[in-house]
Amino acid sequence: MAHCPGRGESRAERGTGLVGRAARAGGTGSPGPHLPARAFVNRAAVVMPAPSAGRISDVRATTVAVPLEAPLRHANGVHPGYFVRTLVEVETDEGLVGLGEVGGGGNSAAQAVEALRPTLLGEDPYALERLRWKCANPVQALYVPLEQMFAAIEFACLDIQGQVAGRPVSDLIGGRLRARVPFAAYLFYRHVAAGAGGERDAETMVAHAGDLVARYGFRTLKLKGGVHPPDHDVEVVTALRRAFPAARLRLDPNSVWSVEDAIRVAKRCEPIGLEYLEDPTWGLAGMARVSRNTWIPTATNTVVVHFDQVPAAVALQAVGVILVDPHFWGGILGAKKLAGVAETFNLGLGMHSGGELGVSLAAMLHFAAATPNLAFAADAHYHHLRDDVIAGGPFRYEDGAIAVPTAPGLGVRLDADKVGRYAEAFARQGAYDYHQDPRRPGWFVVFPGDSERYAAPGT
Ligand SMILES: [Mg+2]
């Protein structure tokens, strides 16, 4: 069991504070002739045994497949009817269990996480810088996305630290500035499945957005474009503006447009007022050319995803907004570091979603709560999920926002039955290729897109 601060001392001992240097030196607590009495009263140094989390004694990874309402189409492929995520449990010899979670582009990350096990056993879950360097040095991470594996470990260690301290993770990283985090409605063109989906044009997308706004109260709408030709996305986003005049709007074609198409789309979108254009093209230089040709800010979660890309992005004035993802940036503390860099250069900061379940979402909520310059509604695919693996059921949206957990640590626990059920689902359904569309056999994306490769409008 964890120790609580002050456990093992009597209330009377704590109240007096007559311990510390004087007591340890065999003194009576009587001040010397030159010092006031309170110089010998050191409450902090004293009787409190250091809170102990113990040492890491086990690391477990379980991959689950959780169903979506309908398959989600994007410029590079399709998320089929489910998301694949790997849940991580870090246990200590004090019996504490911290939770983490990581994606894998449709694949299990269990093997990669478990490969870190020998590196982690016996380590102190407070030693996060040490663990980061042991698990994910940047050269080693050229071969495997170790930052993301480490992020799951870091979430779990912070969860443990919070449980020991009796405080939510947000209190460990600066404290909550907001109790609720606003999210955007994430609008995808969807294939039809089980009576849901079928969005393929302006009319169906506006209806879908209306449904999400009514159910969850979203005030920001993000269209995942790039499936159809660029002008099709302009038509859809223009219809969304007409239907939701007060909403904040974003468009994200996942980097597929040419620079020229991106500039043309930006010009067409200027009158309807996007809050940003996300990854309209590939590469820092391309993004810089787009940025120079429109007042609409550009945002990215693809070309600024490592700290070493930030100086070039700033020098080129390539992007206005960085969409941080605590997984990509090596954990909550890495994301906080990026937030500091963004603050330094006065870059906008939003938050990317990689299709999280409740454990990762909790980590994102704590980060968002304690990050002052996270000025844009966060992205989350979460409302597309039919279920979650956390106890008590999925997080609930209210007025387009989700409340930050207040229980110690991440504030979420796993529902063992659901983990078992969705682990079986993964064993049955298996991994999927993020870069394919099973309904378009033989197709694959090429940057920049062209009329041969975009899906025909209305399909
Ligand atoms: Mg994006």
Image: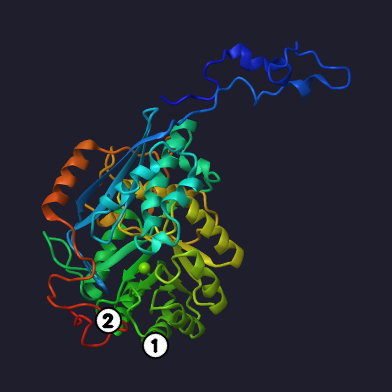
Residue under label 2: 446
Colour treatment of the image? rainbow
Secondary element under disc 2, as helix, strand or loop, is: loop
* Ligand 1 under 8 Å from disc 2 Cβ: no
Q: Amino acid at mark 1?
A: Arg
Asked if residue 132 is positioned above or below residue 22 in the image, the reply reads below
The quarter of the rendered structure image containing the C terminus is: bottom left
Q: Position of residue 122 (x, y in %)?
A: 41, 36
Query: Which residue is pictured at 50% across the width and 60% down the height?
Result: 375
| Crowd around label 2: few <14 · some 14–19 · many ≥20 (10 Å) | few
**Neighbourhood count class around disc 1 (C-alpha, 10 Å): few under 14, some 14–19, many 20 upward:** some
Identify the element where label 1 is drawn: helix
1 or 2: mark nearer the eye: 2
Q: Kindly identify the residue that appears in the image at 39 percent across and 46 percent down.
A: 153
Q: Position of residue 309 (x, y in %)?
A: 49, 70
Q: Which image quadrant is residue 142 in?
A: bottom left
- In the image, residue 284 above or below residue 80: below
Using the rendered view, name the quadrant where residue 344 is placed. Answer: bottom right
Q: Nearer the viewer, residue 26 or 241?
A: 26
Question: Ligand 1 falls in which quarter?
Answer: bottom left
- Say which quadrant the N terminus sits in: top left
Query: What residue is shown at x 47% (from left), y 24% (from top)?
Result: 3
Q: CA distance from mark 1 to mark 2?
A: 20 Å
Earlier in the chain: of badge 1 and badge 2, it is 1
Q: Disc 1 designates what residue?
A: 264
Is residue 387 visible in the rendered image? The answer is no
Residue at image position (64%, 22%) is: 46
Q: How many marks?
A: 2
Q: Nearer the viewer, residue 213 or 54?
A: 54
